[in-house]
Image (cartoon, grey):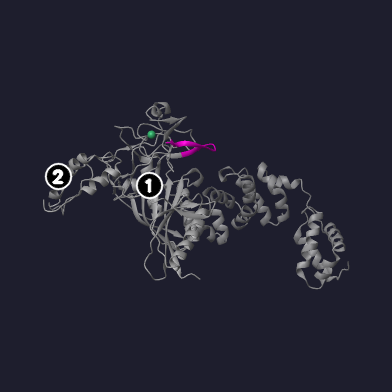
């Protein structure tokens, strides 16, 4: 066991859900052809002036509120100066001394992760080094992303394992999606995460940290942290030293590599941007955003467990707001636990197999509640549900209508005949069952279900089996 | 002046950060200018500002926001024609990795 413990702080950039950019009216559309959403402001032409997007400010306030931050009535934009071809102005407009919100926290399970600050800034452009798979003799710049509004959420180093970093990201993502602040889609670049990580012996003060970048999924964040913690621990155990540096995650090799250290790389010479007046937030603006906050995932989870759902069921259902909304519509007219059960076992399977977004579930909730009611009334077996569900899902069919086409074998005399046949063909299982091995009945029941394509009522089958056992029926 | 607020190394460092190359003469001249400016600032620093609100912007104008509405962007041709070099619909710059 290692006597070193990690301390992890995350810097998460999320794209605020606006139609236009932070300081100009260019579109934020994802996937637009290169350099089509650009104008003199976001390409940094001389003499232009930035103007603040009200919606971006509102979403930043809302984010501050759901992250339990202090909202600053007065905040400032600052220039962060550096040269890079994805940044035509040679400075990024960000917030430094006076961010829009600070000192909050996010509950990850029972653990409180404190937030240092959440501040507004603009995104940079994109650099390409290849066209298709052919390398270019220079670098190509697409400025469509340049000026897209971002919120950078910086946590304290309160996270103490890669798994907790993963859970923090999942919780944060869910929260921001519920509140309509960001889509948090890593594939579309609307969420990015950098990690600060150090290790120390228990009881000692924080060690020297490294910053890791270039992770493309939450899983990669977890993997990169696991690797980096092991690397640092090994270095220290061998008597070495950790250097404060930026390291890049290489997913193919599963390792982090030190970036070329550049002198003065971190002298950003922040100063208040004279082109932008400070932001003054009124009580009304803040309370208006409070009103825009819907019921959040943690509250929903609590309500669902009070409805009788298990922790696991509630966690699965609240994962996406659309799924939770769907569940509520089903549970309005049927038993919530059984509804959750059928959603998790059958609905989610269909959704995952067919890769359908939650917003486009073809089966309407009314039809699903009818199915749930048939189940709770004992009018339908799990086997039948399994049989009819795919068709029901795809065609948005009423379950009762589908049942008309299914012969349900409920006649006891008929079931008994099939059971006796099954016993004859599974003599060993029958003898085991008679000898007291309850599990052996499963093979016989399975045989019956196969013969009847799942349409025999398993309760009745079981009952008949017991009767036959008591009669000491001989195969 | 009581103490040195800037030395020649700082001028070189700033030139470097700003990606401009400075001749020895220019360094001398900038050094002299910066020393004067910073000397003036250090004079201001002596004023007691204990109960004075900081001025972050010279104009006493409150919020001016823009509605989140997409307006027609400039055509990419119009913007790209200002580029030193282009390739297809991209700006082209020296290789950066
Ligand atoms: Zn623009």
Q: Which residue is mark 1?
A: A60
Q: Could you say which is closer to the camera, residue A49 or residue A267?
A: A267
- In x, y percent, where is residue A56? 38, 42
Q: Which residues are magenta?
A: A128-142
Residue at 86% x, 71% y: name it. A472
**Residue most extreme to the front:** B24
> Badge 1: how crowded within 10 Å, few (<14), some, or many (20+)?
many
Residue A372 falls left or right of residue A197: right
Dots 2 and 1 on the same chain: no
| Quarter in which the C terminus of chain A is drawn | bottom right
> Can residue A148 be seen?
yes
Letter of the chain that mark 1 sits on in the rendering: A
- Estimate the x, y position of residue B33 in percent, counting from the top left: 17, 42
Q: Are marks 2 and 1 in contact (CB under 8 Å)?
A: no
Residue found 68% across the figure and 53% down from its top: A374
Please tell me whether mark 2 sits on a helix, a strand or a loop. helix
Name the residue that disc number 2 marks.
Answer: B36
């Amino acid at each position: 066991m290692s006597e070193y413990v990690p301390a992890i702080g995350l810097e998460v950039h999320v794209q605020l859900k606006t139609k236009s950019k932070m300081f100009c009216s260019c579109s934020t559309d994802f996937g637009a052809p290169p350099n089509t959403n650009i104008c003199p402001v976001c390409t940094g032409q001389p003499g232009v002036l930035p103007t603040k997007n009200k919606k971006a400010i509102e979403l930043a306030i809302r984010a501050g509120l759901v992250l339990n931050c202090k909202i600053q009535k007065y905040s400032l934009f600052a220039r962060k100066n550096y040269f890079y071809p994805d940044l035509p102005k040679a400075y990024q407009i960000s917030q430094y001394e006076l961010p829009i919100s600070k000192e909050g926290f996010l509950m990850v399970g029972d653990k409180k992760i404190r937030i240092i600050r959440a501040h507004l800034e603009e995104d940079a452009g994109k650099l390409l080094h290849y066209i298709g798979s052919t390398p270019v003799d220079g670098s190509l710049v697409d400025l469509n992303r340049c000026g897209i509004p971002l919120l950078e959420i910086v946590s304290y180093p309160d996270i103490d394992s890669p798994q907790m970093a993963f859970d923090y990201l999942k919780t944060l993502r869910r929260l921001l999606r519920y509140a309509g602040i960001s889509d948090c889609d890593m594939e579309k670049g609307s969420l990015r995460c950098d990690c600060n990580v150090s290790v120390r012996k228990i009881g000692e003060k924080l060690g020297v940290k490294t910053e890791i970048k270039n992770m493309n999924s939450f899983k990669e964040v977890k993997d990169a942290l696991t690797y980096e913690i092991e690397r640092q621990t090994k270095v220290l155990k061998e008597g070495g030293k950790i250097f404060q540096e930026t390291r890049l995650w290489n997913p193919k090799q599963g390792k982090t590599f030190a970036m070329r250290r550049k002198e003065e790389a971190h002298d950003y010479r922040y100063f208040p941007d004279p082109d932008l007046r400070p932001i003054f937030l009124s009580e009304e603006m803040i309370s208006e955003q409070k009103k825009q906050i819907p019921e959040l995932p943690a509250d929903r989870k609590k309500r669902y467990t009070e409805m009788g759902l298990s922790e696991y069921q509630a966690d699965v259902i609240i994962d996406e707001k659309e799924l939770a909304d769907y569940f509520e519509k089903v549970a309005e007219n049927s038993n919530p636990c059984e509804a959750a059960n059928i959603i998790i076992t059958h609905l989610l399977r269909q959704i995952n197999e067919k890769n359908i977004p939650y917003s486009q579930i073809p089966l309407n909730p009314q039809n699903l509640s009818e199915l749930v009611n048939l189940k709770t009334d004992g009018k339908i077996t799990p086997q039948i549900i399994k049989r009819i569900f795919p068709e029901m899902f795809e065609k948005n069919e009423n379950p009762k209508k589908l049942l008309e086409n299914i012969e349900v074998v409920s006649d006891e005399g008929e079931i008994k005949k099939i059971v006796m046949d099954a016993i004859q063909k599974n003599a060993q299982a029958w003898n085991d069952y008679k000898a007291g091995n309850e599990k052996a009945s499963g093979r016989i029941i399975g045989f019956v279900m196969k013969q009847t394509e799942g349409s025999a009522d398993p309760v009745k089958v079981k009952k008949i089996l017991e009767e036959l056992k008591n009669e000491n029926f001989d195969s | 002046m009581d103490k040195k607020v800037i030395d020649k190394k700082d001028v070189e460092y700033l030139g470097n950060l700003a990606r401009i190359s400075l001749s020895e003469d220019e360094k001398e001249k900038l050094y002299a200018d910066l020393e004067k400016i910073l000397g003036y600032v250090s004079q201001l620093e002596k004023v007691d500002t204990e109960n004075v609100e900081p001025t972050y912007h010279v104009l006493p104008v409150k919020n001016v926001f823009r509605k989140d509405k997409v307006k027609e962007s400039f055509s990419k041709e119009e913007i790209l024609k200002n580029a030193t070099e282009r390739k297809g619909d991209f700006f082209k710059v020296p290789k950066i990795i």
